[in-house]
Amino acid sequence: MALNPFFLQGSSEEQRLLQSLINEQLKIYGVEVTYLPRKLIKEDTLFTELQSSVFNDNFSIEAYVNTYEGYGGSGDILTKFGIALKDELVITISQERFEDFIAPFLEDFPDNEIKISNRPREGDLIYFPLGKRIFEVKFVEHEKPFYQLGKNYVYELRCELFEYEDEMGGWDVQSQITEEIDSVLETQGFITTLKLISIGSTASVGVTTSTGYIRKISLTNDGYGYTKVPTVSISTAPAGGTNATAVAITTAINNVYSVKEILLTNPGAGYTVVPSVSIVSVGETITGVGYTTYGVGAAATATLVTSSAGINGVTITSGGSGYPSPPILTFTTPTSGIGTAFGRVSVTTDNVVDKVFISDAGIGYTSGTATAIISDPPIITGIGTFQYNEEVTGSISGAKARVKTWDATTNTLKVGTTDGDFLASDVIVGTSSSARYSVDYIETAEFSDKYDKSDEIEEEADLIIDFSESNPFGNY
């Protein structure tokens, strides 16, 4: 036998005693940190790339801070992309404490979320309460000190300051510590801010009638080459009348750009003879080419009504809200039962009705009987309350994301870990809360990082040296 038989060389009793002493030392000289295991949400198995993850559990454990003189690493570095914080932290935790008080909980999670549960893993987070900072475990050393009495007793965790990307925060059991972490995580990463519709409203319009108006404008030639929208010129009405106005709508078929139709924005009033209609092409002078016009050949004629009344004008009294696409405009039928007016409206990017176009001003209306209504928005009232970290889906786009914050007062939903692009016509549905709201418009979609100070640094630097000058170091 090579070893001395009169010495135990690390019996189970000796190992148990040493483990107990180490545990006691860590409780006396250590600090209580919060261990946050990383759960996998979405993984690219082809490239073995982790695309999104969540941290929704936390465990308190005592740890000895090896870097007791301060943070390790390169510290704060000024780069062309902003300020990079390269602080590092090395801590030591007890193997036994981890295996007894953390590993059993991790074993209960599905294997696709927690792949290794019996030891700390690279990618997990450590919340360091003294600096109120979050560090990511980069390497787990389990052989230091090296097999004292034939066994290892601690894990040495080498950590770097956590750089947030598309991970999710939030914890089932809230505490003061985890709320502090949560406030850091929930507002960082790639954030899409959606303005939702809580209470949509129906737009309304006022209608007036008159005689001597243009009922409609008919195209006699649609022309070609109208790559820019032409203007429509209508001769003026006699004194005391109202000038008619109209716009051209263009189309493209097989790369042939032509005028599709002419719509009235005001049928006018007081005309006694048929007014002339001219379609004026947009023109400009191009260097080396000369004066160029965009489109030729289009012509149209007006249909004048002098013996009866029709729609003279439509005024928007309320633009409403919640219209992701133009609603339907409907005019009442005149008492004669024929000659109903037709038209349509347009909406802004804020989903509000802003313009009315008339394709036929109708005939046979009497004063005070002509009215028009605009159809309701698709969703009048949103319901429910979105929950933090739940998955939401767009009804039309199919885009999926995780909820960051939901402000019911301003109807603002911030989401992260977006898979696909949301559309202004989407209805956002929460998988857990079943909340349903229509998207009014997409306010922002950008990466939010509290360490990204490049713009501020550039502005301050320009006050010192302005490289847009021919001589930034002098005054000439």
Image (cartoon, grey):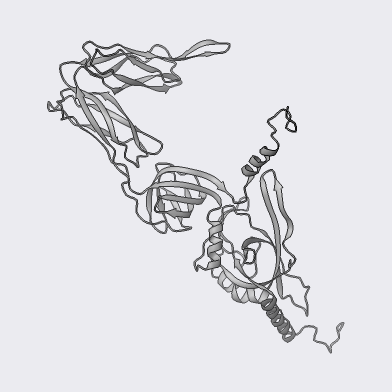
Residue closest to the eye, 320 or 376: 320
Residue at image point 35% right, 39% down: 323
Tell me, yes or no, if residue 205 can be seen here: yes
Task: Identify the residue at image location x=66%, y=44%.
Answer: 81
- Number of marks present in the image shown: 0
* Residue 362 in sight in this render: no
Considering every residue shown, the one lying at the far front of the view is 475
355 or 136, nearer to the observer: 355
Residue 110 image point, x, y percent: 54, 65
Please, is residue 378 above or below residue 343 in the view?
Answer: below
Q: Is residue 473 left or right of residue 364?
A: right
Image position, residue 367 (x, y; %):
15, 26
In the shown orientation, is residue 318 left or right of residue 191? Answer: left
Q: Residue at x 42, y 56 (%)?
A: 386
Please, is residue 5 above or below residue 101 in the view? below
Q: Residue at x 49, y 43 (%)?
A: 444
The C terminus lies in quadrant: top right
